[in-house]
Image (spheres, rainbow, N blue to C red):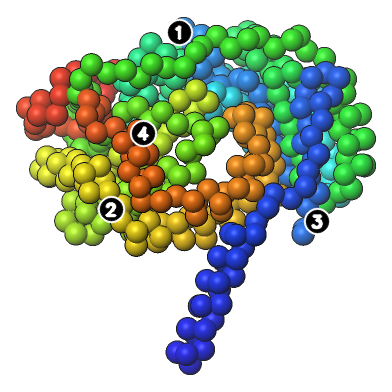
Amino acid sequence: MQKRFALLAAGLGLATALAAQTYKLPAYEKFVLPSGLTVYLMEHHEVPMISVSMVFDGGAVHDPEGKSGLAAATAEALRFGAGARSKAQLDEELDFTGASLVTFAGKESAGLRASFAAKDQALVFGILKDLLIAPQFDATELTNYLARTRDELGQAKESPRSVIASYWNAFVYAGHPYAKPTGGTPEGVGAITRADVAAFYTARYRAGSSAIAIVGDFKLADMKRQVTEWLGGWKTPKPEKATYSAPALSFEGARVLLVDKPDARETTFYIGGKGGVNFTSPDYVSLSVINTVLGGRFTSWLNDQLRVNSGLTYGARSQFATYRQGSTFQISTFTKVSSTEAAIDLALVVLDSLHRVGIDETTLKSAQNYVKGDFPTNYETASQLSALLTSFFELGYNEAFINSFQQQVDGLTVARCRELVAKYIPRDKLQFVLIGKAEAIGDLAKKYGTVTQKPIAESGF
């Protein structure tokens, strides 16, 4: 029995490895409608479903002063009735067919995702067209959403782990649009009107700066004809040019933002700085492997040291938070107030070890196998593939990233790891964001850099 299990496990491992080595992005077609809308189509016949992904140049970076949260409100308000249907009618028709439809706004773009049975495509495509071309922005629905969102944002600060990323962005990107919180602030959301939403929609949801990807059970020629008829008449003004440039992320020295939460029993913290890599960088894949070693999986160095070996936290990780024009690198975790210093110091020891000692051949090979094994599972379903195609448009890369992934992972060497760590992962002039009880950790914070303190009750991001 054990031998049979071992053979099965070995077979599955070999199959996973072979899948990673041979995975290529399925064929797709890309074209641009006369309106300027970019279209991606891909056949995917495994199940009789269709998935749609759309992206718009409507992210939080475009929130105007005093209206933080407008991008998120506009994306949500697309579903507050469209064409001749009220919000209740939209929800009822989608529920009846079992279709899913979500809208959202991120830092740099807004998006729409839908998934539905192929047999219901006429109905759902009709609804999606109305959402894009004739949204109602129902005043009552919008008022209710804004009130609910304002309350939720106020309550969110009871959970430091849910807001620390916003404090981090406000701290390291100060003065740049990336500092704007994706979800907004209670004050900003409270100032939004229906006229603001309609104006934001008109300015940011334009065909020439948008893309749609449709993946699923259809014939490509039929879908190309259908989408041309469906959205060929979407007329919008030419897109507005980008109003922001790459952030400098230049720090004169180590700094600490201490966000005081007087009732905190834990300290939640980020440590990091400039990352310097985005999705179009030739080093992106290699850095993903390196980060897997440091803090990208359960058996990473950070998690081993801070959770498994010392019991200082339930989990520690690291990541590159990547945008179109740059990124930051950060280590993140949380710990008891009494163990704040021990946890921060141990995280710094692990970071220093990455620079000083580096990654050995055995560790690198393990990380390479892990990354390759995990890779194909990210691009299996129609919804994953449709989101991938619109990310090509949004972030400026293409299928070469997918098709050369195996080669890039295997090409990483120990020597190259050292070069990339030195280039992209900060070691000095580190930036710290700590959310916790200032009375207990205020003096400690001075150990790590120049301290700025603010109460969590204020809108510090």
Are the two marked residues, 1 and 4, in contact with CB atoms closer than 8 angstroms?
no
Residue neighbourhood size for the residue with mark 3, other residues' Cα within 10 Å, grouped as few (<14), some (14–19), many (≥20): some
301 and 201: which is toward the camera? 301
- Callout 2: SS: helix
- The residues bearing labels 1 and 4 have C-alpha atoms spaced at a distance of 35 Å
- The residues bearing labels 3 and 4 have C-alpha atoms spaced at a distance of 41 Å
Residue that label 1 marks: 66
Q: Position of residue 15 (x, y in %)?
A: 59, 70
- The residues bearing labels 1 and 2 have C-alpha atoms spaced at a distance of 42 Å
Q: Position of residue 273 (x, y in %)?
A: 31, 28
Q: Amino acid at mark 2?
A: Trp
- The residues bearing labels 2 and 4 have C-alpha atoms spaced at a distance of 18 Å
- The residues bearing labels 3 and 2 have C-alpha atoms spaced at a distance of 41 Å
* Mark 1 or 4, closer to the camera: 4
Rendered view: 81 above or below 311 = above
Q: Amino acid at mark 4?
A: Tyr
Which numbered disc covers residue 301? 2
- Callout 3: SS: loop
362 left or right, relative to 433: right
Which numbered disc covers residue 424? 4
194 and 309: which is toward the camera? 309
Which numbered disc covers residue 57? none
Q: Amino acid at mark 3?
A: His
* Residue that protrudes farthest toward the bottom in the picture: 1
Regarding residue 49, the answer to whether it shows in the image is no
Rendered view: 384 above or below 461 = below
Residue that label 3 marks: 45
